[in-house]
Image (tube, rainbow, N blue to C red):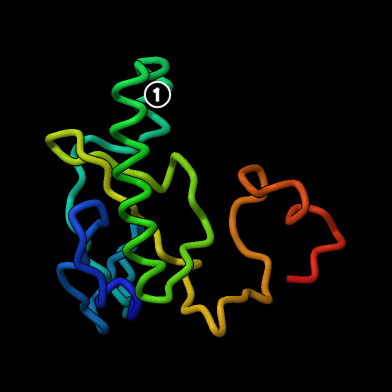
Amino acid sequence: MEILKTLDHPNIIRLTGVRPKATYKKKSGKTREALVIILEYASGGELFDYVALCGRFSTEIARTYFHMLIDALAYIHSKGICHRDIKPENILLDNEFRLRLADFGFATFLKRGTLTTKLGTEGYMAPEIRSKNYKG
């Protein structure tokens, strides 16, 4: 959450608010205290669902989305942040179908440009990272 607070880029989902002690009501009627993170709404949904529904993109559209993603990644990398879970389910589309990078739950600040932990969605990882011999 702290990482997301520092980001301001047109292709990154915005954190609009935090409620550290909100009341959450369960279906059973019981309540409990919860941390609530309020994010910008991306009405276009996940890129994964869009591609599954509509099929592959034309070269021009794919190139446009690729540039938006690279711009967002270049921005967070310039801030010393590594996302660590880039996948179509974490790329959202807004109401104008602009790409918005989301889900910074595994993100971390880089220390001297290296990572020492293996995090992310295994099916989207490079083979050498998925292997059991990963040493960071």
The residue furthest right is: 133
Q: Mark 1 points at which residue?
A: 51
Quadrant position of the C terminus in the picture: bottom right
- Residue placed at 39% from the left, 24% from the top? 51
Q: Determine whether, in the image, residue 33 is placed left or right of residue 106.
A: left
Q: Is residue 54 above or below residue 96?
A: above
Image quarter of residue 96: top left
- Could you say where residue 8 lies in the image, as x and y percent from the top left? 19, 67
Q: As rendered, which of 33 and 88 lies closer to the eye?
A: 88
- 98 lies left or right of 134: left
Residue toward you, 74 or 54: 74
Q: Which residue is drawn at 51% across and 78% down?
A: 110
Q: Tell me: 117 left or right of 27.
A: right
Label 1 packing within 10 angstroms: few (<14), some (14-19), many (20+): few
Q: Residue at x 77, y 52 (%)?
A: 128
Residue 59 image point, x, y percent:
37, 19
In the rendered image, which quarter is residue 35 located in?
bottom left
Q: Identify the residue shown where x is 36% and y is 71%.
A: 78
Q: Nearer the viewer, residue 53 or 86?
A: 86
Note whether 60 is above or below 78 in the view shown. Answer: above
Q: Reply above or below: 49 against 74.
A: above
Say which amino acid is labelled 1.
Val
- Image location (x, y in percent) of residue 44: 22, 35
Q: Nearer the viewer, residue 83 or 61?
A: 61
